[in-house]
Image: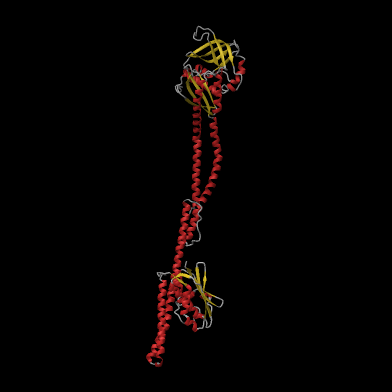
């Protein structure tokens, strides 16, 4: 089955566009999330460097640092804070518990010391109001935890009066749960009383970090990692960690820095990837509708595009089929300047060239046919023209040989001489006509006065004019023309001789010159019988005898007008013959001399 070019282009274009759509979909679903995450992490890392530089300038200015943290969150939707070497938030000055430790002989290092314990590790921000009643100054408190170096790591706080227990779950599990084997600190049991309690006055604003349970839990887990010296995280350079909670992915970036005292601190950043996941999921959901819409659009565009591209090719195919059948009537419209436009233009040129060559060939064939007909007519005419004088001469010779009319010898000799002269003129005219029709004859141009030539020829033919008592009327102008004088004289002689021959006795002949802008028109009109309209064109043919009314004059060879026609055509001037009201007009034009 033959497949059209439109169908092929449609299928190819649809397949290609569908492939591109599939690649885009696969690329976005598989690589977009990774790209998005990497871009977000890189942006956050770059901003952390800026935060670090500003932090070192404002290390002792807690409000300024809090403002920096808030601005960081606003710009990147990421939480950032600074931790000390033990993993506690450095700027938790508004959420802590101050305890005066009892003197103890068991632990002289911490005996009688005043310590501060960050409460965000034990109390969620929303539980502050509920617990605040138990955290009164003077209340006795028991601290269970561990000692790491000179730092106390509290795991459980017990308020004796109310028997209220506050627990840091991560530290507690490390020292008292399943992770005990990982603990690197020494167990610690301390008692004391509360001397000061600092609780946040509002739930948002400067305290927004405490409200983020995920952030606080990860900070406490970071503390555990520091305590256990987890081998997978040395925290001696920037660390990026992944974790997932409640179906949301997060990135933690921890960068160690040195404070003004030379101690190691940490910039702790928590970035939620939930917007990334939501964006990816939205794209997946959106692509279901987008793919349907785009696929329909691809089909429509491919169909239009295929027809648009194939239309010129179909037009080219249609036109070339006509050219193959030698029908050159239709041209291909050229609407573009690309390869198809150039092809269409070349096919149009080829069509025109072939058409012109075929027309020329047909004309040559027609001319050849006409030439063949002319040859036949010429041979027939020559045969006819020669047959008559030869017959007359043969009859005269027979009569003279038989001696039948011996007293008329002079008459027969004159008759034979007359026929010989006629044959001589015929042969001369035939040779002259052949010379003109050969295409090699070149006319030499002269400048002469046309009126003088006309007067001279009329004077030469005065005897013939007088015999028929004709009246010749002349209307001439003294004008010089450019032509071959002998040949123009020959034309004028033929035209005026014809006029004399076909004009009835005692009738008029009019010879005139009409001066035009660049030419002079010479007219010879004789009164007498008209030439039939269908014979006006063929009158210029050699030996033509179509018009019976004009065959009454037997003089001439029948080649005069044919010779005149060739002479005038070699001059490249207009000529013709037409019937007037009561006669016939022959005319031709010549170029005036400048």
| Viewer-side residue, 545 vs 325 | 545
Report the residue that reaches farthest toward the front: 478
In the rendered view, tell whether residue 414 sits above or below residue 20.
below
- Quadrant position of residue 395: bottom left
Report the residue that reaches farthest toward the left: 401
Residue depicted at 54% across the width and 43% down the height: 294
**Whole-percent x, y for residue 494 in the image:** 46, 77
| Viewer-side residue, 318 vs 26 | 318
In the rendered view, tell whether residue 502 sits above or below residue 224.
below
- Quadrant position of residue 78: top right
**Whole-percent x, y for residue 548 in the image:** 50, 80
Residue depicted at 48% across the width and 59% down the height: 321
| Viewer-side residue, 506 vs 220 | 506
**Whole-percent x, y for residue 440 in the image:** 40, 69
Q: Examine the rendering and report whether any part of residue 562 can be seen.
A: no
Q: What sort of colour scheme is used for the picture? A: secondary structure
In the rendered view, tell whether residue 524 sits above or below residue 178.
below
């Amino acid at each position: 089955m033959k497949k059209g070019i439109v169908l092929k282009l449609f299928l190819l274009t649809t397949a290609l566009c569908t492939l591109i759509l599939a690649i885009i979909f696969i690329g976005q679903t598989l690589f977009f999330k990774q790209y998005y995450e990497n871009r977000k992490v890189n942006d956050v890392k770059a901003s952390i460097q800026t935060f670090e530089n500003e932090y070192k300038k404002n290390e002792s200015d807690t409000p300024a640092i809090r403002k920096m943290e808030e601005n960081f969150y606003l710009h990147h939707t990421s939480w950032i804070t600074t931790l000390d070497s033990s993993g506690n938030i450095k700027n938790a000055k508004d959420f802590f518990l101050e305890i005066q430790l009892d003197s103890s002989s068991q632990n002289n290092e911490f005996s009688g010391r005043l310590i501060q314990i960050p409460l965000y590790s034990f109390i969620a921000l929303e539980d502050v109001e509920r617990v605040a009643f138990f955290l009164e100054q003077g209340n006795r408190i028991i601290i269970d935890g561990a000692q790491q170096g000179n730092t106390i790591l509290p795991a459980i706080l017990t308020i004796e009066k109310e028997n209220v227990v506050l627990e840091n779950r991560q530290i507690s599990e490390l020292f008292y749960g399943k992770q005990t084997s990982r603990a690197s600190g020494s167990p610690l049991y301390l008692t004391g009383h509360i001397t000061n309690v600092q609780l946040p006055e509002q739930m948002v604003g400067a305290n927004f970090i405490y409200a983020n349970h995920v952030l606080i839990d990860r900070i406490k887990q970071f503390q555990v990692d520091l305590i256990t010296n987890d081998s997978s995280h040395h925290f001696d350079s920037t660390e990026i960690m992944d974790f997932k909670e409640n179906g949301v992915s997060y990135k933690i970036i921890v960068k160690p820095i040195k404070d003004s005292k030379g101690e190691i601190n940490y910039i702790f950043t928590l970035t939620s990837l939930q917007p990334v996941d939501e964006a990816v999921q939205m794209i997946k959901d959106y692509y279901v509708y987008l793919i349907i819409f785009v696929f329909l659009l691809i089909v429509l565009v491919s169909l239009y595009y295929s027809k648009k591209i194939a239309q010129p090719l179909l037009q080219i195919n249609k036109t070339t089929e006509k050219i193959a059948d030698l029908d050159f009537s239709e041209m291909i419209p050229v609407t573009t300047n690309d390869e198809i436009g150039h092809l269409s233009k070349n096919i149009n040129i080829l069509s025109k060239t072939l058409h012109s060559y075929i027309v020329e060939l047909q004309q040559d064939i027609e001319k050849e046919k006409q030439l063949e007909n002319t040859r036949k007519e010429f041979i027939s005419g020559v045969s006819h023209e020669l047959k008559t004088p030869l017959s007359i001469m043969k009859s005269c010779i027979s009569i003279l040989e038989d001696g039948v009319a011996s007293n008329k010898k002079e008459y027969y000799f004159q008759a034979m001489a007359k026929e010989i002269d006629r044959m001589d003129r015929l042969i001369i005219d035939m040779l002259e006509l052949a010379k003109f029709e050969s295409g090699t004859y070149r006319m030499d141009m002269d400048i002469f006065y046309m009126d003088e030539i006309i007067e001279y020829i009329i004077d030469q033919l005065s005897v013939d004019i007088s015999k028929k008592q004709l009246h010749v009327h002349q209307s001439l102008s003294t004008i010089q023309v450019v032509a071959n004088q002998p040949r123009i004289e020959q034309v004028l002689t033929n035209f005026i001789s014809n006029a004399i021959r076909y004009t009835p006795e005692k009738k008029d002949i009019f010879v005139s010159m009409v001066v035009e802008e660049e030419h002079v028109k010479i007219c010879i009109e004789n009164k007498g019988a008209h030439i039939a309209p269908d014979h006006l064109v063929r009158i210029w043919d050699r030996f033509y005898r179509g018009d019976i009314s004009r065959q009454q004059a037997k003089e001439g060879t029948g080649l005069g007008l044919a010779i005149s026609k060739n002479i005038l055509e070699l001059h490249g001037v207009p000529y013709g013959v037409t019937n007037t009201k009561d006669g016939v007009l022959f005319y031709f034009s010549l170029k005036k001399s400048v």
